[in-house]
Image (tube, rainbow, N blue to C red):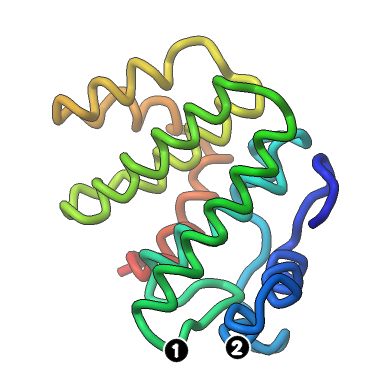
Amino acid sequence: MAPVGALAGVDRIADAAARASDVWARSVLPADERDGDVLMGPVAGAAFADGVETIYEGYLVHHAPRARAFAAPDREQGLLLGDYLYATGLVRVCEAGDVDAIAALADLVSLAAHLRATGVGLDGELWVATARYLGGARDGGLDAAREALRDGDGAPLRALVADDAAASLLAEHRRLMGDDA
């Protein structure tokens, strides 16, 4: 496990999973077949970068056509691997001792999965807004945007990520999710 604060690249996430289990090792893609590198971790700040990026890779394992560093042999192993990555990332976030960060990530994982399952979209926007929240933008805007989103209004969430920096993150998220039509 990389120390908290050290940015965990996709290669390090894959290598750590392979060391943790022979089962996960069989799902790791060869280095030359990996697609992309860190995306959400750097936005979340040094204290949370490793954990957020590991959780994001778990999200991709669960919901994307193909994750950046893993290809599980079947759906069942993919679900278990994604859960392992969620748990590993959460342990890394817990090491920072920030209860609000843990709550924000728990809400992110459940709400983003719901958005993806219902076809609403906006999961990328939720990822970017949550990463920014963890990185220091804790002004209450995320809480209000999540509440509005639960009530069917995505406008406040879109407003939180309506800038050029977010646009590049969202474009890459959509590409990874297979939504870049």
Describe the element under mark 1 as helix, strand or loop. loop
Q: Within 10 Å of the Cα at label 2, are there few (<14), some (14-19), or many (20+) other Cα atoms? A: some
**Relative to 99, residue 28 above or below:** below
Residue 26 on image: x %, y %: 60, 88
Describe the element under mark 2 as helix, strand or loop. loop
Q: Within 10 Å of the Cα at label 1, are there few (<14), some (14-19), or many (20+) other Cα atoms? A: few
Q: Residue at x 59, y 43 (%)?
A: 90
Q: Quadrant of residue 28?
A: bottom right
Q: Earlier in the sequence, mark 2 or mark 1?
A: 2
Q: Residue at x 42, y 21 (%)?
A: 142
Q: Going by the image, does 5 lie left or right of 77?
A: right
**Relative to 96, residue 31 above or below:** below
Tag 1: residue type? Answer: Pro
Residue 81 on image: x %, y %: 50, 69
Residue 82 on image: x %, y %: 48, 64
Residue 149 on image: x %, y %: 24, 29
Q: Which residue is mark 1?
A: 73
Tag 2: residue type? Answer: Arg
Q: Quadrant of residue 102?
A: top right
Q: Going by the image, does 126 lie left or right of 139?
A: left
Quadrant in which the N terminus appears:
bottom right
Q: Residue at x 52, y 41 (%)?
A: 166
Q: Residue at x 65, y 21 (%)?
A: 136
Contact? badges 2 and 1 (CB < 8 Å): yes
Q: Nearer the viewer, residue 115 or 73?
A: 73
Q: Rounded to the nearest whole Å, what is the CA distance between mark 2 and mark 1?
A: 8 Å
Q: Which mark is residue 26?
A: 2
